[in-house]
Image (cartoon, rainbow, N blue to C red):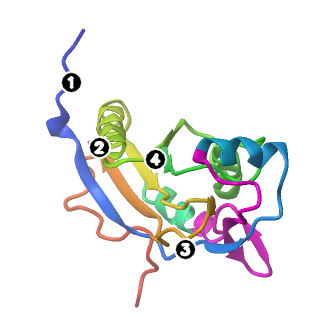
Amino acid sequence: MARISLGTVSVLATGALPFRAEPRHCTESGPRTHAWRAFHDVAPECPLQVALFRNGSETALHPADLESHWRQLRALGEEPLLVYLHRGHQEDTRNPILAPLLARIAYRGPVHALRVESRRALRDALDFARVLAQGAQRVLVLNDPTHRLFSGETPSRAPLRYLLLGRDTAFDRPIATPFQQETP
């Protein structure tokens, strides 16, 4: 097997997106939340909360404006391979968290979704993304720290973060903020 040199992978861009989920009372009960309650040792009478993004008058698993940010990134060149890092479970366990994201940004390319619950898992996921960047022109890591289903205290409302990796030599310097609007 050929040895891969990770030294040729560069960080082309990094930053945070201005989206934060809002906690709401979870109306779901029954078999779909029963497994989550059992796994986390949460009593049936304990109220659950769900974190959703406000999209106008509606709420969703992912922010609506993510699509416009994705279009800005795609305008920079070849569509990147997507590595989506997520946390916890969502209210409707029949629908994986990745499917609504792909529909939101209209992405049809290669993708990996990894559940990351610890610093070690995050480090492993970033190593995985660096290896992927050896075979792809660019890899976008979207780190979504949102705990979508929880009980008790509201978890941290950290923003979505991104990391654009690549072996792209078309840039003389890293792209500082590809998701921000240009200012005149």
Percent position of residue 164, x then y: 35, 53
Mark in front: 4 vs 1: 1
Residue at x 76% of width, y 65% of height: 26
Residue ID for mark 3? 20
Sequence-first tag of 1 and 2: 1
Sequence-first tag of 2 and 3: 3
Mark in front: 4 vs 2: 2
Q: Secondary structure at mark 2?
A: helix
Residue at x 35% of width, y 30% of height: 135
Percent position of residue 74, x then y: 50, 56
Residue at x 62% of width, y 48% of height: 107
Q: CA distance from mark 4 to mark 3?
A: 28 Å
Residue ID for mark 1? 4
Q: Amino acid at mark 1?
A: Ile
What are the residue bounds of the magenta stretch?
40-68
Q: Nearer the viewer, residue 143 or 12?
A: 143
Q: Report whether residue 79 is seen.
A: no
